[in-house]
Amino acid sequence: MKRRWLLVSAFVLFFGISIALVVWHGPDWSAVHDAFTAVSWPWVAVAIGLNLLSVVARSFSWRTCIEQSIEKPHPRYPLVFSAFCVGLFANAVLPGRVGEIARAAVLRRRMPGRTGTTATLIGSVFAHRMFDLFPTVTLVVWVLLAAAIPPWAYLTIGLAIGIGVLLFVTAIVLARRQHRELESLGSVRLLLARARQGLAIMRKPVPALKATGFQYAGWFCQLFAVWSAMKAFQIDEPLAAAGLVLVLMNVATIVPLWPGNVGLVQVAVATPLVNYGIAYAHGIAFGIGLQAIEASVGIGIGLVFLAREGLSFATLRDMEDRDEDSLEDVTPVDHEPARSRLAG
């Protein structure tokens, strides 16, 4: 209960700060309204379609991570995609990274009789997110060379890349650690060992390249989705400007202080576009539209698969706490099978 109140208080505090910033550094809202009246809806449809393709590519990447983490039979792709979409929905409507735990928990429900699998799936989620590093670095290098970057963005982008590299190296180190005598471990340490098993792909170059390839495809689709959204809002700027928007939008959502970091994202999108001669109000309108386009995919397909899984929003909201309880399925009798899996 105390933890819940802390989360609620933090949410109210940061959301209040966001609203204050938008009001203080806010645009001419009549100009924002005018920007929406000129939207080209066919380009909006293209952006939505490209975002959907990005989701498909990223879900294939996660499936590749799963296949290296658990024994056969592996979950079928439709089940992986369903869990992935539920996770997108959770990340879009709830603060924190509940969606990362939710997708592991939802897929675990479809894999009965596998003790400790939830911890391994959560490890695979972490591994999957690590493969974002390569397309991110590629995009950042291109943007640095081709886009008009505001001075304040250099430090922000540098910190984000630095954190990404640190996490990637940590994932590799953890993946290479193995316990030789798991039968002597307690439940908590065995749980952590199973989570590390989810990072198995980090020590397998060919599957890792495959997962990275899918992530590149996902980022490529998302880049052109941003460019299409720019076209929809009558922003006729080069693809490099779309790359800059994509980089700063992702930086603004690294730490999910409230659902979607609404307000912060719009400022992060509109400010650099001023360097391209785009009015701040027009950039804010574009930022609202761009986030709505992305949310329409995550929330739309997420709701479909949430219903397909027989889950409610209330259940999803409490999934983080309930999933922590479900991880406590480690028992001493299962130590030996776990040891043989990790040794292999």
Image: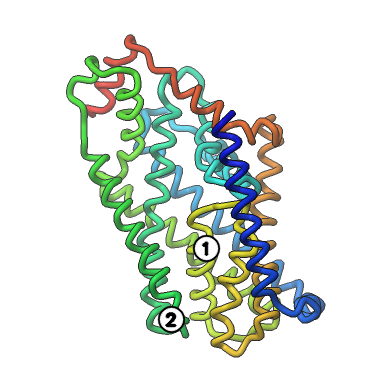
Binning the other alpha carbons within 10 Å of mark 2 as few (below 14), some (14 to 19) or many (20 upward) gives: few
The label shown at residue 252 is 1
Is residue 106 among what the camera can see? no
x, y (%) of residue 258? 60, 51
Q: Residue at x 50, y 35 (%)?
A: 104
Element type at mark 2: helix
Binning the other alpha carbons within 10 Å of mark 1 as few (below 14), some (14 to 19) or many (20 upward) gives: many
x, y (%) of residue 123? 39, 37
Determine the CA span between mark 2 and mark 1.
16 Å
200 vs 14, left or right, is left
Q: Residue at x 39, y 32 (%)?
A: 120
Q: Residue at x 54, y 87 (%)?
A: 275
> Viewer-proximal residue, 224 or 157?
157
Element type at mark 1: helix
x, y (%) of residue 209? 32, 54
The label shown at residue 133 is none
Query: Can you tell which quarter of the image residue 267 is in?
Result: bottom right
- Residue placed under numbered mark 2 in the picture: 151
x, y (%) of residue 106? 56, 32
Query: Can you tell which quarter of the image residue 184 is in?
Result: top left
Work out whether 135 lies above or below 284: above
> Viewer-proximal residue, 28 or 238?
28
Work out whether 278 lies above or below 261: below
> Viewer-proximal residue, 323 or 9?
9
Q: Amino acid at mark 1?
A: Ala
Q: Amino acid at mark 2?
A: Pro
> Viewer-proximal residue, 318 or 60?
318
Q: Earlier in the sequence, mark 2 or mark 1?
A: 2
Say if mark 2 contacts mark 1, CB within 8 Å: no
Q: Residue at x 66, y 30 (%)?
A: 315
